[in-house]
Image: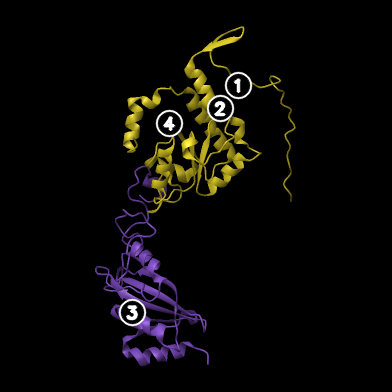
Amino acid sequence: MALTNEIIRQKLIEKFGEEITGWEEPYGMLTFSTAKDLNLKVLQFLYDEPTLQFRFMTDLCGVHYPDNEGKEIAVVYHLHNLVENIRIRYKVFADVNKPDIFSASALYSAANWMERETYDFYGVNFIGHPNLKRILNVDDMEYFPLRKEFPLEDQKRTDKDDEMFGRS
Amino acid sequence: MARPVQYNITNKRLETPISIGEAPEGYSGEGFFASRLSDVVGLARKNSIWPLPFATSCCGIEFMALMASHYDLARFGSERVSFSPRQCDLLMVMGTIAKKMAPVLKQVYIQMAEPRWVLAMGACASSGGIFDTYSVLQGIDQIIPVDVYVPGCPPRPEAVLDGFLRVQDLVENESLRRRNSDKYKELMKTYGIQ
């Protein structure tokens, strides 16, 4: 029998019950979230459970929601079951002042560099990551550029007149 | 409707049968020519500039056109494009330089032997261009001194040729001792280059 969103949902509810919230199915892709402390348990369950077998991590990324107080930083996992060809999306949220999240790099090797990228741009502190340092930006960058409080432009420029760019 | 093709039908008469570059000032007699050494060195350098292309994006494509038969930079003595900085005289920076690329570019510049010149081609290399963002260097003159800027996005090969002729002017007229001058050393110091 083919694996469907309904079966995945039932399996997760059997195991975790009310811990899992925010059920959604945008464009047919099952999406849910939990508290951030549970992330490794949920991922391990999705990986090991013989009917689910989500053994491929397609993507891991961060999102910054500045208005979502206490849950400003989201970390989104995209998992793929290659046998059944079905994908799910799993989100955890953290406080922007203490963005500590357990690292999934021991479970999915693909998470290693993607967590470094997420740290690079959003400053998420992945606990247990073997080598958490910047990967795309210059090493001496002093901030996390994709957080909304930082302007896009390089603030150290001296030769560009704001008026000429229509932003005075 | 197809655009009408226009041909250059105005004949341009040759001024002389063979065009010869201008000789420097000096005394000539039968079998000898005496001039200042600096002028001769300038003339020789000017017509044998070896460019080092540092092409990172679309300006590099224009540069390829510049080197090819239609525009042919070789006419100006730059037949040999070298990819070893130690052999080159002119660093041509073409394209967006990300901040992460900046140390590489600087290293290439440091590896070049004096005398060396730099041409910044296009808006990105000159000023960061449209990439006014945290990850892009806002002009290569933040890390290395630049002699000639060629504006455009990307500039046409003719524009780069013009820029190259400006570099030739600099090379021809530059004092041989300029690189030892205090002013030059001061400039290098501001970039942290010995």
Evaluate whether label 4 is on the same chain as label 2.
yes
Looking at the rendered structure, the kind of residue marked 4 is Glu
Left or right of B106 on screen, residue B79 = right
Q: Which chain is purple?
A: A
State how far apart marks 3 and 1 are (Cα): 75 Å
**What shade does chain B have?**
yellow
Left or right: A85 as drawn, with respect to A118? right
The crowd level at tag 1 (other Cα within 10 Å; few <14, some 14-19, many 20+) is few
* Chain letter behind tag 1: B
Establish whether labels 3 and 1 are both on one chain: no
* A12 relative to B118, above or below: below
Q: Residues within 10 Å of mark 4 (few under 14, many from 20)?
A: few
> Which residue has dot 1 on it?
B21
Q: Nearer the viewer, mark 4 or mark 2?
A: 4
Q: Kindly identify which residue carries mark 3.
A: A40
Three-letter residue code for mark 3: Leu
Q: Which residue is mark 2?
A: B47
The reply to whether callout 1 and callout 2 are in contact (CB within 8 Å) is yes
**Foreground: disc 1 or disc 4:** 4
Residue type marked 1? Gly
Left or right of residue A123: residue A6: right
- The first of marks 1 and 2 along the sequence is 1
Q: Residue at x 33, y 50 (%)?
A: A155
Q: Which chain is home to disc 4?
A: B
Residue with the mark numbered 4 = B114
Q: Position of residue B31 (x, y in %)?
A: 61, 9
Which sits in the foreground, B47 or B70? B47
